[in-house]
Amino acid sequence: NMKKILLMLSLAIMFSCEDENEDSGSGSNAPLLGKWNMTSMGDYENANCSGNVDNSGWAFMQSFFSQSLEFKSDGTVAMSISAFGINSTLPGTWTEDKDQFCLMGDCIDFTINGDKLSYNEQSEAYCEDSSGNETGETTQSSCESAGNDWYPASCALNEFTKE
């Protein structure tokens, strides 16, 4: 379920470790600077981020979800997320010589191709009870035997276009 994966991604980023400061670059990465708006999201066929990407749910998701990244010349980045009318901004850092940004301790590798920035987000398999709480079951059979819902490992492609 793409909506559930997207919300899990947002929550995982928001509630992970505290921000780690990185040295900021001195500034010739002009193509990265500025605001990037999410323009597509989809799940790869395979959990190892390979195969075709199914982004058929993106059009529906756009009605209640938006996300942007803003890279500044001082080495800071802000990820703004709006979902179901709730807005939040996550502060982070980026360095001139690395194709990655870090939010709350998690660093994410990205690629830029023209006016498109993209990154993969992998999620491990997990089991959830009817209240939406993750359980201790580590296999699909034990999870489903306990009457819970199993969510297999997955990988999502997140794409942004420069504003």
Image: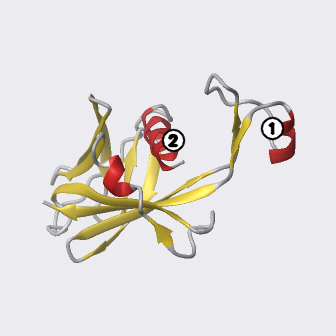
Task: Examine the rendering and report whether any part of residue 71 can be seen.
Answer: yes
The quarter holding residue 20 reads top left
Residue carrying label 1:
143
Task: Examine the rendering and report whether any part of residue 98 can be seen.
Answer: no
Q: Amino acid at mark 1?
A: Cys
Measured from the top left, where is residue 68 in percent x and y? 25, 49
Q: Is 60 left, or right, of 52 in this rendering?
A: left
The residue lying at 22 percent from left, 64 percent from top is: 161
Categorize mark 1 by other alpha carbons within 10 Å: few (<14), some (14-19), many (20+).
many
Q: Is 22 left, or right, of 25 in this rendering?
A: right
Of 99 and 163, which appears nearest the observer? Answer: 163
The residue lying at 31 percent from left, 58 percent from top is: 95
**How far is mark 2 from mark 1, CA to CA?**
18 Å
Q: Is 33 left, or right, of 4 in this rendering?
A: left
Q: Amino acid at mark 2?
A: Lys
What is the number of callouts on the image?
Answer: 2
Label 2 residue SS? helix
